[in-house]
Every structure is written in C-alpha cells, then in structure tokens.
Image (tube, grey):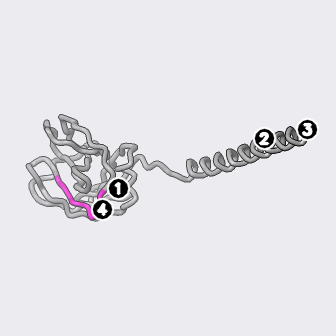
Amino acid sequence: MKKTIIVLLIVLMTGCSFKTNLTVNESISNKVESSSEVITTMKVIIDEKEYTANLENNETTKALVDLLPLNLNMNELNGNEKYFNLDNNLPTNEIYPKHINKGDIMLYGKNCLVIFYESFDTPYSYTKIGHIDNLPNLGSDNISIMITK
C-alpha cells in the first residue's frame, strides 16, 4: 500500500511539474514572438532620392537590418552593380539565381553587399536580401548611399 501511494505521489508531482514547465515555456515563447518585429522594408537613399527596398524574410536580412543605419561608399563593378564589403560577416543561404533583376539587393559571399542596377544572367551564387523597384541606372562611378529602417 505504501509503495502504491509513493508511486502515485511521484506521478502526480511529475505531472504537475511538467504542466508548470510547459506553461512557463509557452509564456516565454509568446513573449519572444510578440517582441520580435519583422522588418519588411528599408530606405535606400541615393543622390538624395529615397527608394524603398522590399526585404526577404531570412536571417541574412535580419542581420543586415541590425546593422542599420549604414552610410556606404559603394564601388562600381561590371557596368551593372555597386558593391560594398561589410566589416561583419552575415549568415548566408546562397542560391544560384541564374538571372539577376535590376533593383535586386544580394549578398555575395559572407560580407559583400551588392545592389544591381541592370538585369543580366549570372553563374554566381548569392543570398537574396531584397529588391528596389524603379531603381535607375546608377552610372559608372562609385556612389555614396544611406540605408535606414
């Protein structure tokens, strides 16, 4: 009889403990979900003109947004892109897009931020960050840009 009561008490205590932990974990999870804000756009200012970049929902984009605001002197490359090597490596999820669209914002490697101002086919891999609609040709010179939330 004593053994049955002890086993019953252990089962009841374990069940109560499990339920309490589950409630605490659910509460923590709900707080994390409600406090983490997903940024879907950012401002890109080029030559005093503001553009809106629509962002991908991925770890690379979140890490870039955490670095904002950024003032960058972007270098010209190949007559179709501007790039800047960030001081920080960002998480990657590279794909081979085969085609780059004008306005695409990508990460090349782990730290090279690229804004494409011409469409073209490519054999290279990138991590997609976002896209700027109506981006003009940015010319053959290096440019200064500001990126903010």
Q: Where's the N terminus, which quadrant?
A: top right
Q: Within the magenta stretch, is there residue 86?
A: yes
Q: Is residue 8 magenta?
A: no
Dot 4 amino acid type: Asn
> Where does the image place residue 10, in percent across and percent down from the top left?
79, 44
Q: Is label 1 in a helix, a strand or a loop?
A: helix
Residue at the location (19% across, 55% down)?
Answer: 83
The residue carrying pointer 1 sits among few (fewer than 14), some (14 to 19) or many (20 or more) residues within 10 Å by Cα, namely: many
Q: Is residue 6 left or right of residue 149?
A: right
Residue bearing the label numbered 1: 64
Cα distance in 3D space between marks 2 and 3: 15 Å
Camera-nearest label, 4 or 1: 4
Q: Residues within 10 Å of mark 3 (few under 14, many from 20)?
A: few
Q: Position of residue 77 (x, y in %)?
A: 11, 53
Q: CA distance from mark 1 to mark 2?
A: 49 Å
Is label 2 in a helix, a strand or a loop? helix
Tag in front: 2 or 3: 3
Q: Closer to the camera: disc 3 or disc 4?
A: 3
Residue 11 is tagged as 2
Residue nearest the observer in this picture, 96 or 7:
7
* Element class at badge 4: loop
The circle on residue 1 is 3
For marks 2 and 3, the one nearer the N-term is: 3
Question: Mark 4 — residue?
Answer: 88
- Three-letter amino acid code at the position of disc 2: Val
> Start and end of the magenta stretch?
82-89
Label 3 residue SS: loop
Q: Which of pointers 1 and 2 lies earlier in the amino acid sequence?
A: 2
